[in-house]
Amino acid sequence: MGYDNIVQTESDGLDNKERQGHNGRFDFITALGLSAGSPGGVGPERRGSSSGEWREIMFEGLSERLGDVFKRLRGRGRLSEADVDAALREVRLALLEADVHYKVARSFIDSVRSRAVGREVLASLTPAQQVIKVVHEELTALMGGGSRELDLSGPRPRTVMLVGLQGSGKTTTAGKLAKMLLARGRRVLLVPADVRRPAAIEQLQKLGEQVGAPVFDSRTDMAVVDICMAALARAAQDSLDTLIVDTAGRLQIDEPLMDEVAAVRDRLRPAESLLVADAMTGQEAVGVAGEFHSRLGLTGIILTKMEGDARGGAALSMLQVTGCPIKLMGVGEKLDALEVFHPDRVASRILGMGDVLSFIEKAQDAIDQEEARKLERKVLKEGFTLEDFLAQIKQIKKMGSLESILGMIPGLGQMKKGLGADQSELVKAEAIINSM
């Protein structure tokens, strides 16, 4: 039975209810007493790819479906086994529609049900909340339980080898990873080991210039293994502690590709062999990960294009199907748009429970504490000016879209559309102040 047939079978007999939208606005210009003419609300055409916004796009359908299911559960008060079974049937359908592997969806529902129909849940004063708690814990476990950091301990230099299919974003990810590791105090050497794709070496050289990392001088007439071994020798000579090797990809898995990356792995013995997989390909990405893992023994996966409108099934299925954890995720086109994958935070956002830790981290990155103290002293002494408001707008924009910020705050995840968090209003306010 194919995937579409499974979804159709699960959907038989279910009521399709149209969701009522909410019109509203979250208008910062109102605070200035200024008016803006654009309608509120954020449609898909307005969404960008800023870091942090990916969850609202990728898991939007799943989050809405689960929100509807749990809303009905909360309205029942006491729950029976039949109530739980009916809810879990809808949860399973939601997972299948989100492109989660059908075996993973079945196993997940079985795990949740075995816990949700227990005495501690059904006899609880708040059984619906207990069911949500169980679902959250099982979702977190489904994606790996906790974040998996890169293991770069041991004798240096350490090597991170990036593998994957052509078009998955390996070269760009190499630049992003270099920027991340440089910020952590690592001394990085980028190694262009893709001698087949036109301009791959030049692309990585430009990325190295942008992030401030040296790039090994590869040539297209060199053997890939020779490039890697020469780069390893240079890293040792220049006291560089981390090599990031960008290997060649193909449009599909083939023997020459596997033989090449296997030869590099055998000679380099990398600390991390990471598959760069395109989240937009859905279950195809899961199949690719399984093939690479069986042949190369991957240590982790980097999911790219998580800011896109894919349904998220690859992220939920990857560990259970392949046995390989997601360690990092690309959440945008900018070189700082690479994040550690936190299963518990992703689960919280899917269930509309917010993500306070990510909110705090983004605030710390975007807001200069010394500048904030200066502003506090100035406001207390001289008052809040339009220039101060403009500075606050710029800091808010650094944190991502208003919709993503609201989604991180507990209780506002399901309300953000009703609030009409329109990012364009910030742009208008900034333009108006700058034109004065």
Image (cartoon, rainbow, N blue to C red):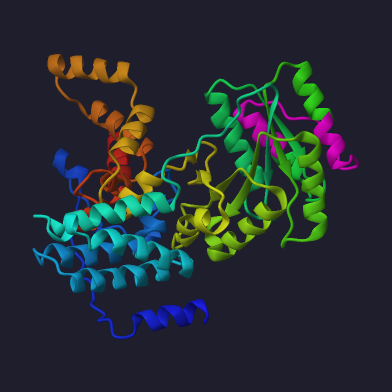
Which one is nearer the viewer's eye here, 379 or 138? 138
281, above or below 376, in the image: below
| Residue visible at 22% across and 68% down in the picture | 84
Residue at the bottom extreme, as displayed: 13
Residue 45: image x %, image y %? 39, 61
Which one is nearer the viewer's eye here, 141 or 364? 141
432, above or below 182, in the image: below
**Residue interval drawn in magenta:** 204-229
| Residue visible at 50% across and 59% down in the picture | 314
Instruction: Judge left or right: residue 398 versus residue 259.
Output: left
The C terminus lies in quadrant = top left
Residue 436 part of the magenta-drawn span: no
Q: Is residue 414 visible?
A: no
Residue at the front extreme, as displayed: 119
Quarter of the image holding residue 257? bottom right
Residue 294: image x %, image y %? 68, 55
Instruction: Judge left or right: residue 197 versus residue 361.
Output: right
Q: Is residue 60 visible?
A: yes
Residue 39: image x %, image y %? 24, 59
Quarter of the image holding residue 269? top right
Residue at the right extreme, as displayed: 221
| Residue visible at 91% across and 42% down in the picture | 221
